[in-house]
Image (cartoon, helix red, strand yellow):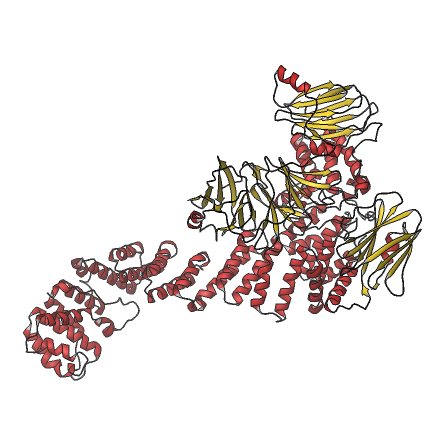
Amino acid sequence: MKAPAVLRLAVAALVAAQLAAPSSFAAERIGVRAWAHPGYGRIVFDWTSDVTHAARLDGDTLTVSFGQPLSADFSAVTRNLGAYVAAVSLDEAGRVVTARLKSGYRMHSFTSGKRVVVDLLPAGDTPAPAKAEAGAPPAAQAPVSLTRSVPEPARQPEPVAARTGMLSPPAGPVTLPVRVGRNAEYGRLVFDWPKKVGFTVSRDGQAVTIQFAAPADVDLDALRRALPRQISTAVVRPGKDGLQLGLVVPPDAQLRYFHSGPRVVFDVVTRIQTRAETEKAAQAAAPPRSLARPKARPGAAASGGTEASGEKPLPDRLVSVEASRLGADVTLKFNWRESVNAAVFHRGAVLWIVFDKPARLDLSAIRLTGRVLFETARQEPVVGAAVLRLPMTMRYRANVRRNGTAWEVGIGPTPKPGGTDLPLRAERRDGEGASVTIGMKDAAGVIPLRDPDAGDTTFVVPGATAVGGVWNLRRFPEFELLESAQGIAVRPLDERVRVGSEGTQARVFRPGGLTVSDPSVFAQAQTRKWTPKLLDFAAWQYGPAEDYQKIEYELLNYVTQPDGLKRSAARLGLARFYIAHGMAAESLGVIEAMLRHDAAMLRDNGVRALRGVGRYLIGHYAEAMTDFEHPALRDERQIDPWRAAIAAARGDWRRAHRLFEDADPVFTAYPTRFAMHFGLLATEAALSVGDIDVAAVRLSVLDATPATSSQLDHAAFLRGHLLKQQKDADKAIELWQAVVAMGDRPNRAKASFALVNTLLEQEKIKPTEAIEKLEQLRFAWRDDVFEFDLLHRLGQLYADTKDFRHSLMTLRQAATYFKEIEGAGALMEEMRALFRTFYLDGDADVLAPVVALGLFNEFRELTPPGEEGDIIYRKLADRLVAVDLLAEAAGLLDHQVRFRAEGEAKARIGARLADVLLMSRKPKDALAALATSAVEPIPAALSDRRRWIAVRALSDDGRLPEALAMLDADSSDEALLLRTQILWRSGDWHRAARALARLTGPFDEDKVDPSEAELLLRRAVALSLAGDEAGIDYLRDRFGPAMAKTARAAEFAAVVGRKPIDTEDFAVLARQAAELDTFTAFMGDGAGRPPAAIPPQAAAIN
């Protein structure tokens, strides 16, 4: 039984204090834990540093001496090991622990990290495995992740002594060696009887039974590990008449069996052989492989050696890479000239492509063609392999094909996974415990990769053919199988996890066994307050945990019944048994097989509920909710805890809290592993909605509930939030610091997140420091709700520090990757508000116009509709025009005209677009823009302005008569100026002079301002070119004295003077006069007035 959470947290806080101020003389307060395993008792001394020790057993007195003094509470020893220990004491010096044992026990001690472990065993028993994890009692299950992919509550491995022989019948007088032979066309079993024994073979479909006439014992675990591919499983059934062996073979396989001396040879043939081949095979009775001492495959590799990654030079051999794009899909082709194995997998938003031979990959095509899909393309330096790392801008799936020696990888929204979803199977091997195998054809060696972002190691097993991968992330207590399109990638959550390649399969294992499939040993079941009808997990265990394998054997035996109805009932019983022991994947496999042969079983509400539970435990929430929301279960109160848990996994804490409020009678009746799981979720839901009274009560209940180390860490994390909401932030910080220092990875990440937010609220760190710390957490733990909250907070902090690009990028990632999480929709509104503020309130004005444009294009979808959006477009276009980025400004305005604006706004923006196009010397495009934006009705002022712009465009395009015709009925000053410019351009100097006379109007003869001086000079040039001497005399006599006082005195005198002027000098003066922006100076640059400058026609002067 685990110590209460409060005790563990007190120990953690004490450890932190001692680390801060160590003393070599004071007695160290340590934790002492004890519990009973099947067959032995264990005592653990939890030191915080390495310490020497010596253990000795004299008769019934056990003494354990330590190299430094200690103080501790030993009540757990006598309470939990009363069958072993009568009393415990500590000497005055605090260095020697003495325990008086009850008779008949012996002792075995060892160290596990900083822990000292003492095992008490019945005299004559084999010592408990020293490599077993000393930090967790047998009653604890492995971490239950309260995240998107919640694994099934799992079990610690039983000692080998408690498992041996449980699947075999009682030992007989003979231990029968069985050897295995493999051939491409048949698989062979050879039973090495010491003397000739009779046998019979019977077959029912795929089930084959071999009945021997004598009893014997078989090493079933070794046989199952070595079975040829033609035999999928083997079961030993005890029988009165002798050994009975059950096998499952392919439906189209043929059987061949015979005696060879005392040996019995049994073949499963998948290709029909000729008679000569059969006779030859019968002579070869000795198979190539023995189960006595299995040899490692030459090509097999197990992870755990030196990692292959590091900054090393890439090899000289170059492999060309082609990149093609069709719509949003990108295809990469790696043109290897030799056969290589490949793996392709996702980790977060990064796509990894791995080949098991070294080469330098030519990435130029990827960087050119795939730059929209990939942020970068980088080859990681890995010894003996070619590894490509592609961070993606959008999370798309990949598929893989092999074409000769070349590999093709397709990425995009359309590609679907190729090959198959590789099958997973849990198995047990003698002396190694439980492991998980992944079926692969031609699995290659294991390649360890160091992730530069997360800083951890992923083990990759490539495949020789494009057989498929693991289509969805599969999370287990000690490891994750990452989503892959080819091969597999394993991310350990426990540093002891190893990966091996075994030819036709990859294997994930750990010294002492994984907890994913081994039975857990739990404390005695709590008294049930209420027995669920649909989900009676306690009853479905069918007996005590120590009888797990015996019960499993009996259930498997029932499944082989020939009667279809009995077989379905037996399968349902087996599925319930597996789910009650937390083996969700195995349970779902049995349910799938049951429904494949008897689909009507799904009409049973209990079957549907059972399948929903299994789907939830492996993290398939949408599928689980499909079962739970079926009309037959929609109103079923017993499903509320599971609905609440799915709501929690999606971040919908209000719904989760509401459902948990009435679900206590349901989940508190569950076995401990489930009760603690739901209790933690219910507490977190209460805290998330601010119901601190309910949260406090729930936490007090959890303190007295047996729990795993991970669950205790989670409870400590939640208690920190309770303290913070109770206005005791300092204690919350201390508690979270203890979790960060000693907790498991998911709770360390969550506690770190809470710490950063709290320290920021207290102004103990700056926003920039908080951003740096939170960025480091992005790959610390992958979980939908946690990652969503983390990205959301990061986006807010980036906005607070005016880093709007990173803010919008981060918020978009949260909204895009986690659409199912509650709050994702509101996040889009938050992004729109941020975008609106940035561009309307002037924050964007501090950026260079081209940078502001780039940011706008990147997040254009956030532009608000209506007038606010139009203002953003206009302000940005004006800034671009001001720095002569006319093409960019025109692009913005064109998009607005085509896709956003309507009615009067469309006509107004179209006029502005035509204006900018005229500045770019594109009169034809300006006329087209006016035509595209033409709408009716519009105000008269806007109509006039559009007409004047059209006149300018026609003039610039050389269509002068059409331009003049548009001004016939227009007597405005603007029309007069435009008419003057067109006449000037056409060389009609008489009419141009008259038009200029109208523009100049009645001037003050004694005082002429600069703008009037410019117009008078232009009028003088026109009269001179027209040969109107009388007009020139009039100007000279009337305005000569006033013009003599202006900056244009010399030019005016030269044009109107009586002295002849040189032709070349006159041409220069005329050209200068033509280039004057006279109207802008004279009329002002008012709103709605077109720029007046018209390029001169110099040829008219020559």
Query: To which quarter of the image does residue 761 belong?
Result: bottom right
Question: Please, which residue is most extreme toward the top here?
Answer: 275
Location of residue 271 with respect to 759 vertically, above or below? above
Left or right: residue 328 compared with residue 480: left
Of 11 and 629, nearer the camera is 11
Give the residue at x 29% y 67%. 1088
Whole-percent x and y of residue 958? 18, 58
Whole-percent x and y of residue 501? 63, 39
Q: Is residue 559 visible?
A: yes
Left or right: residue 924 compared with residue 502: left
Location of residue 716 with respect to 142 vertically, above or below? below
Left or right: residue 517 compared with residue 397: right
Query: To which quarter of the image does residue 952 belong?
Result: bottom left
Of 785 and 926, nearer the camera is 785
Whole-percent x and y of residue 48? 76, 61
Give the residue at x 72% y 61%. 719
Give the residue at x 74% y 21%. 264
Location of residue 771 with respect to 255 vertically, above or below? below
Give the residue at x 85% y 61%. 73
Whole-percent x and y of residue 1067? 12, 69
Of 767 and 461, nearer the camera is 461
Q: Is residue 727 visible?
A: no
Q: Quadrant of the C terminus?
A: bottom left
Q: How many callouts does the rendering have?
A: 0
Of 501 and 78, nearer the camera is 501
